[in-house]
Amino acid sequence: MRIFWTFFWTFLLVNMVTYVVSSMIGSAYHFGTGTTLAVIATVLILLIAQLIPNDPVHH
């Protein structure tokens, strides 16, 4: 379920950013570009989450 929600929010936010940026620079919005970037961002987020240790820090 964690993977689904990560993809869901990443999908929405990346497509929103892609739309806004393409509007600001005057080019056409492409749904496929936003979706591809969302999949790549989701994989990177999940990889980074796996690499960060979850153990408590001992002083």
Image (tube, helix red, strand yellow):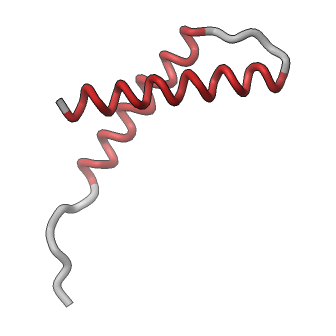
Q: Is residue 23 left or right of residue 37?
A: right
Q: Is residue 23 above or below residue 32?
A: below
User: Looking at the image, how many numbered discs can be counted on the residues?
Assistant: 0
Farthest right residue in view: 26
Query: Could you tell me which quadrant the N terminus lies in?
Result: top left
Residue 35 pos. (x, y %): 49, 16
Horizontal and vertical percent for residue 59? 20, 90
In the current view of this chain or complex, which residue is farthest to the bottom?
59
* x, y percent for residue 45: 37, 41
Task: Please tell me which residue lies in front, 12 or 47.
Answer: 12
Residue drawn where x is 59% and y is 25% of the image = 16
Q: Residue 17 is drawn in which quadrant?
A: top right
For this view, does 35 lie left or right of residue 9? right
Q: Residue at x 35, y 32 (%)?
A: 43
Q: Is residue 58 above or below residue 6?
A: below
Height in image: 15 above or below 43? above
At 24% from the left and 31% from the top, the residue drawn is: 3
Q: Residue at x 85, y 17 (%)?
A: 26
Residue 53 falls in which quadrant of the image? Answer: bottom left
